[in-house]
Image (tube, coloured by chain):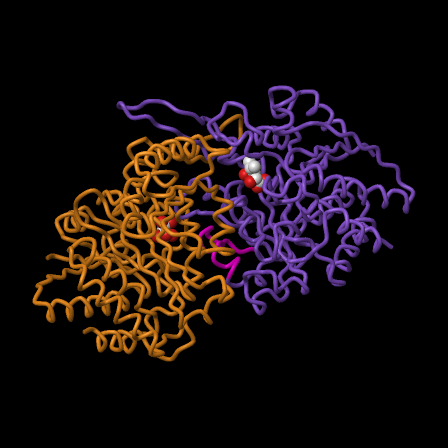
Chain colours: A purple, B orange
């Protein structure tokens, strides 16, 4: 299997290095052969090529089995009004690969409950899978731009969804729910948005066609409360791109540190894109202290979703769990282990 | 002063009744004269007139000094795809009154820290004022609708802001920050949205013109984390309509119960609109057990912002604080007091 690695900026290279190591250990143990090729994307690509994602790199990614990504962005390229920006690479990659569903599981390791700002009694049993629509909505809708109207400067974005865009991501949510608690919460703002009314209509129809799965609809404002007040009542949550961006970052606080959380972005066919949900963390970049767990768990998702290696994926997840149970902690969790030392502990525990 | 009362649906009538009582007590004590007139808006107006807000009621509101609102909506009118919906009344009222700034203060009473899902150490000193833009953005942007494109059904909303819409609400945030900690956090998604780039550009310019106020920009996904992980570091937060909807509901969990929180919606001139941030809570409607504090504190904001009665506003707020300190609690806070009994305790403490 060919895996393209996009270390990106900030702590990206440090954490992807360790995740690649874990994949190499898995390959050796289980007799697989993974070929890694590293490419530039994000700020580093802007510096080298003037754009955040070159056509060549995108072509390489498309021709791979899976893409493992660190993080993009940093103070050097931080002007959001600049013409060329690191996150254009990320958005171009998502769109280019057609990975319309971003899976963000949020589990709370019992040993990390103390690190969370949420009280322990609310965290018991939390096991949420947020599925964020990733290639539509406000991020990509057209028109998007600026003009002048009656002498006033005006800027606009378009939140648009076509029926098939909603259908494929909600159907995926139902499919995944069948392997879990058979419960889907579809989050929208159907009392205000036309796009949400279409979303709800389609979700309702899919719900009717899948009577073995319990579907409920929740308004996004309510969901932003419930994620904190009663996270254990949520299982599979499916929502549009912008709402998903906000809600998954919010949900990450449950786990005690963003550094713990992985994500997988998948399409109908073709390679998936795997990345931790944290950013490039410029404040700690280059110090070797970033938590590699989010990226290592993203690599586990890569094994599962792109390579079909469920047993291997589960063994990586168990090794991470065991390391945390045994008290291994990076700085974000109040511990002393560096990036490499934390990965060492995980590698040690790979059966 | 003429005050239009719109009790609305669900628990709305129960909580507005108590807030009106508090205003009457204030009037009597301080020698003011308030004339209340009650009107239909929301589901009850749909039942009586076929629309959620009649032109007559809007005209009454416009001709008043202030509008006090309970809540709208309920299972009876719960189909978000229906042509006529309760929240159209609320949105029409906001737009009709031109109340572009929705002030949502979030304070955590020290005696209620146990009711919050957030750990006590994070709650110490929390005193946030979220200012949500209320008459623009995704809620009102045009075009908004449905069509068919290449055989696919498509639905769309427009997130649009004109420079003056951003300027007036951010300027208000700066004005209010000067009476507080001189700190403004402007929340946007400038790395993705054109409308956010305009927002950030204008906020930056206003920041430069007000060097005595510290301005920082925060992405909405980051803000959704920080509100839970480090709420005490935030003071005045200003953001667009949809982000504000999500973030204020999220922030409400800090206070232990949504039932505690008030809001004021104000424009450049004309009457303000005052409402608790909770909804119509159909599950407890008619039982006399809803928490009236959010509405009573909204009435205090009415005294302050629409009637210029700062001392009276502060005395209501002190009475609420004292009642909570003394252990008075409605059911949402684990107590036994009903709506009226809770209001009695507050009235008793009005100096
Ligand atoms: C960097 C940014 C464009 C991106 C997004 O908003 O999708 C990030 O916040 C994320 O969640 O992956
Ligand atoms: C009822 C709904 C339209 C409204 C909104 O989204 O503004 C509510 O959620 C609020 O926050 O006041």
Q: Is residue A167 visible?
A: no
Seen from the viewer's position, the closer of residues B248 and A111 is A111
Position above or below: A59 against B304? above
Seen from the viewer's position, the closer of residues B98 and A39 is A39
In the rendered structure, which segment of residues is drawn in magenta? A215-228
Q: Quadrant of residue A120?
A: bottom right
Determine if the magenta segment contains residue A222: yes
* Residue A334: % across, % down: 64, 58
Position above or below: B266 against A180? above
User: What's the magenta bit mostly, secondary-structure-wise?
Assistant: helix
Q: Residue at 16% of width from left, 47% of height from top?
A: B62
- Disc count in the image? 0
Quarter of the figure that contains the N terminus of chain A: top right
Q: Is residue A230 left or right of residue A275?
A: left
Determine if the magenta segment contains residue B301: no
Position above or below: A159 against A60? below
Q: Residue at 39% of width from left, 41% of height from top?
A: B215
Q: Is residue A133 left or right of residue B207?
A: right
Quarter of the figure that contains the C terminus of chain A: bottom right
* Residue A53: % across, % down: 63, 25
Q: Is residue A25 left or right of residue B95?
A: right
* Residue A129: % across, % down: 63, 52
């Amino acid at each position: 299997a060919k895996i393209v690695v996009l270390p990106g900026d900030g702590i990206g290279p440090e954490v992807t290095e360790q995740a690649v190591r874990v994949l190499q250990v898995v390959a050796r143990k289980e007799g697989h052969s993974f070929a890694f090729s590293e490419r530039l994307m994000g700020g580093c690509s802007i510096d080298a090529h003037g754009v955040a994602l070159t056509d060549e790199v995108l072509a390489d990614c498309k021709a791979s089995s899976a893409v493992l990504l660190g993080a993009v962005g940093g103070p050097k390229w931080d002007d959001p009004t600049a013409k060329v920006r690191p996150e254009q690479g990320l958005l171009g990659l998502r769109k280019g690969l057609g990975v319309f569903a971003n899976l963000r599981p949020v589990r709370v390791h019992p040993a990390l409950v103390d690190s969370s700002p949420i009280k322990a009694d609310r965290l018991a049993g939390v096991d949420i899978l947020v599925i964020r629509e990733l290639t539509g909505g406000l991020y990509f809708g057209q028109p998007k731009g600026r003009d002048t109207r009656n002498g006033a400067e005006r800027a606009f974005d378009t939140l648009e969804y076509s029926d098939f865009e909603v259908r494929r991501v909600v159907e995926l949510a139902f499919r995944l729910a069948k392997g879990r608690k058979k419960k889907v919460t579809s989050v929208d703002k159907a009392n205000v948005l036309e796009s949400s009314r279409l979303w709800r209509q389609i979700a309702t129809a899919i719900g009717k066609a899948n009577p073995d799965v319990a579907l409920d609809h929740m308004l996004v404002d309510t969901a932003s409360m419930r994620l904190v007040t009663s996270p254990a009542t949520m299982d599979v949550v499916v929502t549009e791109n912008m709402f998903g961006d906000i809600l998954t970052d919010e949900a990450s606080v449950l786990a005690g540190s963003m550094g713990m959380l992985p994500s997988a972005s998948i399409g109908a066919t073709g390679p998936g894109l795997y990345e931790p949900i944290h950013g490039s963390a410029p404040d700690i970049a280059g110090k070797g202290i970033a938590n590699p767990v989010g990226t290592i768990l993203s690599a586990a998702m890569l094994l599962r979703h792109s390579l079909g290696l469920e047993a291997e994926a589960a063994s990586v997840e168990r090794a991470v769990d065991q390391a945390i149970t045994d008290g291994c902690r990076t700085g974000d969790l109040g511990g002393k282990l560096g990036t490499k030392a934390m990965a060492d502990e995980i590698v040690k525990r790979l059966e």
